[in-house]
Amino acid sequence: MPEPVVLNAFNFESTVLKSTTPFLVDFWAAWCGPCRAVAPIVDEIAAEKAGSLAVGKLNVDDQPEIAQRYNVMSIPTLILFKDGEPAAVSIGASSKEELLKRFEAFL
């Protein structure tokens, strides 16, 4: 089962912005309860959509400059990037069905 990529300042551009497939980024932090609740859902989506969607996780405590660049003010925030640009955003904990519905038009 494909694991989400751990994203950081060194690989964000090459991994997310230059991806040829849509890329879902989970902005999270270890202390965030809702982030921990969403994590297994993100993992399931990564497994189910492997090949048509890439998935990565970015710890906002470790990479605050990237979170700021995309105006991430609260977590969890999931941003779907398509062709290197943010295409859709989900803020807060959501069900798998809600997330898939929000992002399906871009997949």
Image (tube, helix red, strand yellow):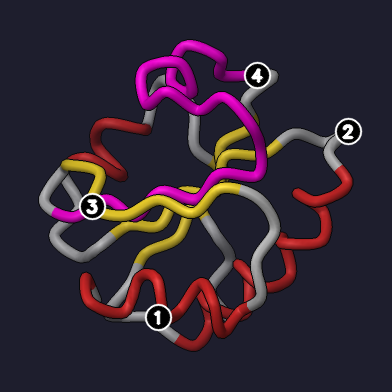
| Residue count near mark 3 (Cα–Cα under 10 Å), binned few <14, some 14–19, many ≥20 | some
Q: CA distance from mark 2 to mark 3?
A: 27 Å
Q: Is residue 49 above or below residue 33?
A: below
Marks 2 and 3: which is nearer the front?
Answer: 3
| Residue count near mark 4 (Cα–Cα under 10 Å), binned few <14, some 14–19, many ≥20 | some
Q: Between 46 and 81, which is closer to the camera in this rendering? A: 81
Mark 3 or mark 2, which is nearer the start of the sequence? Answer: 2
Residue 51: quadrant of the picture: bottom left
Marks 4 and 3: which is nearer the front?
Answer: 3
Marks 3 and 1: which is nearer the front?
Answer: 3
Q: Residue at x 45, y 60 (%)?
A: 55
The residue indicated by pointer 1 is 50
Mark 4 or mark 2, which is nearer the start of the sequence? Answer: 2
Instruction: Kindly indicate whether the residue at mark 3 contacts the one at mark 2 (C-beta within 8 angstroms).
Output: no
Q: Is residue 69 above or below residue 39?
A: above
Q: CA distance from mark 1 to mark 2?
A: 28 Å
The residue indicated by pointer 4 is 62
Marks 1 and 2: which is nearer the front?
Answer: 2
Q: Which mark is residue 87?
A: 3
Q: Residue at x 54, y 77 (%)?
A: 98
The residue indicated by pointer 2 is 31
Mark 1 or mark 3, which is nearer the start of the sequence? Answer: 1
- Residue 24 in the image: state x and y as whole percent: 40, 57
Provide the secondary structure element on which disc 3 rests.
Answer: strand
- Give, as a single range, the part of the protein colored magenta: 62-82
